[in-house]
Image: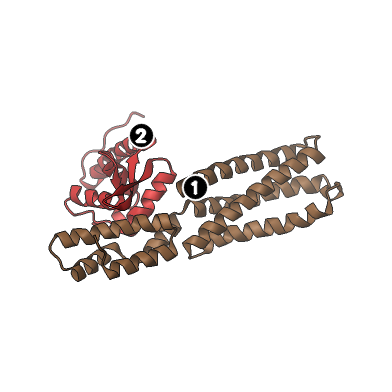
Chain colours: A red, B brown
Amino acid sequence: MKAELLKGHLDALILAALERGPLHGYAVMETLRESSGGQLDLPTGTIYPALHRLEAAGLIAGSWSLVGGRRRRCYLLTQAGRKALSGRRADWREFARVISGVLEGSPWPATAS
Amino acid sequence: MASHRLVAHCRQDLLQRLPVEVAEEVADGLDDSYEEYLSRGLTPDQAATAALAEFGDPGQIVDAFRRASPVRRLARMLVLTGPLVGGWWAAALISSRAWDWSIPLSARLVAGPLVAASVALLMTALLSRRYQALQRAGIAGCLGVAALDAAVITTVMVLAPDGRWLFIVAACLSAVRLTFVARSLRRILVQAGM
C-alpha cells in the first residue's frame, strides 16, 4: 500500500494495534503487517518516532522490561488513547461513508434545510 | 542470542546519533527482525542483510525522530509566538518609558544577551540536523525563554505596580507561555527518563 495513503491514519493504526494489549515497537509493526494481510509494511523510521509522539501526547504509555536478557520498551494504551481511538474510528466510518458515496455514485443522503 | 556484526555496527551508529534509551529501543527492533529471519532458515549473513534492508537507513530513522521531536515542536511554537509576546512587552515598556526605571545596570546588560541566546538556541533546535544537538539546544532555549518570562513579570510587578493594561496583557501572555513551557518540559524530561 502506498505510504501517502496512510498519512493521517498512522496514529489510529498504532492505537488499534495496541488495543488488545501491550506491545513493543517491532511487535506493533508485525501486528499491523499480519492484520492487514501484509499490506501494511511500515518502515522502522515511521513506527518508532510515531510511538514516541503518541507517548508524548499521553495516548500511550511506555515502560522498560527485561525480556530474555534484553531491555525492551513496551507500550500500552492509556484511557486517553482508548478515547482517541474511539473518536478516530467514528471519524473513519463517517469519512469512508461519504467518500464511498461520492466515488461509487450512490445517492447523497438528503439533509434538512 | 549473539548479534551479527552488521547489526552491531548499525546499533553502534544509532547509539552515536540518538539518546541511549531511544537507540536501544530501536536497535531492539532490529535484533527482533534479525532473529525472525534466522528462524525462517536464512544464514546469519542473509538474515542480517534482510533485517537491515527492512530496517531502513539509520540516517532516515534519526531524521524521523528529529522531525517528530516534542522539543523541536515546543521550540517552533516559541519562535512563532515570540514576536507577539515580545512585541506586546516592547509596546508596554516603551509606552511607560521603562528606560527611566531604576533597574540595576547588571540586569540591563544581561537581558539583551539572554534574549539573543534564547532565540539562537531555539533556532538551532529548529534547524539542526543532529538529534542530540537539537534536544540540548531546544531545552536550553526553552529554559531561557521561561527565565525571561519569569524575570520580566517579576520586574514589572515590582517597578510598575499601577497595572497599565498593556502590562497586564503582556504579563498574562508571558504567564501562559511560562506555564505551557514548564508543563511541556516536565513531560519531555520525564519521558526521556531525566
Q: Residue at x 40, y 50 (%)?
A: A52
Residue at the extreme top of the image, as rendered: A112
Q: Is B70 drawn above or below residue B41 in the view shown?
A: above
Element at label 2: helix
Label 2 near label 1: C-beta < 8 Å? no
Q: Amino acid at mark 1?
A: Ile
Q: Amino acid at mark 2?
A: Lys
Mark 1 falls within which chain? Answer: B
Q: Which mark is residue A83?
A: 2
Left or right of residue B88: residue B179: left
Element at label 1: helix
Nearest the viewer among B192 and A94 is B192
Q: Is B75 drawn above or below residue A57 in the view shown?
A: below
Q: Residue at x 16, y 68 (%)?
A: B43
Residue A89 picture quarter: top left
Q: Residue at x 60, y 40 (%)?
A: B179
Mark 2 falls within which chain? Answer: A
The number of numbered discs placed on residues in the rendered structure image is 2
Q: Is residue B191 visible?
A: yes
Depth-wise, is mark 1 or mark 2 nearer the camera? 1
Q: Which mark is residue B65?
A: none
Q: Which residue has dot 1 on it? A: B188
Using the rendered image, report if marks 1 and 2 lie on a common chain: no
Q: Which x, y percent locates residue B37?
A: 18, 61
Residue B174 picture quarter: top right
3D distance between C-alphas at marks 1 and 2: 22 Å
Q: Which x, y percent locates residue B59?
A: 39, 67
Quarter that holds the N terminus of chain B? bottom left
For label 2, count other residues whose C-alpha is less than 10 Å away and answer few (under 14), some (14-19) or many (20+).
few
Q: Is A90 drawn above or below residue B89 in the view shown?
A: above
Q: Which x, y percent locates residue B25?
A: 35, 54
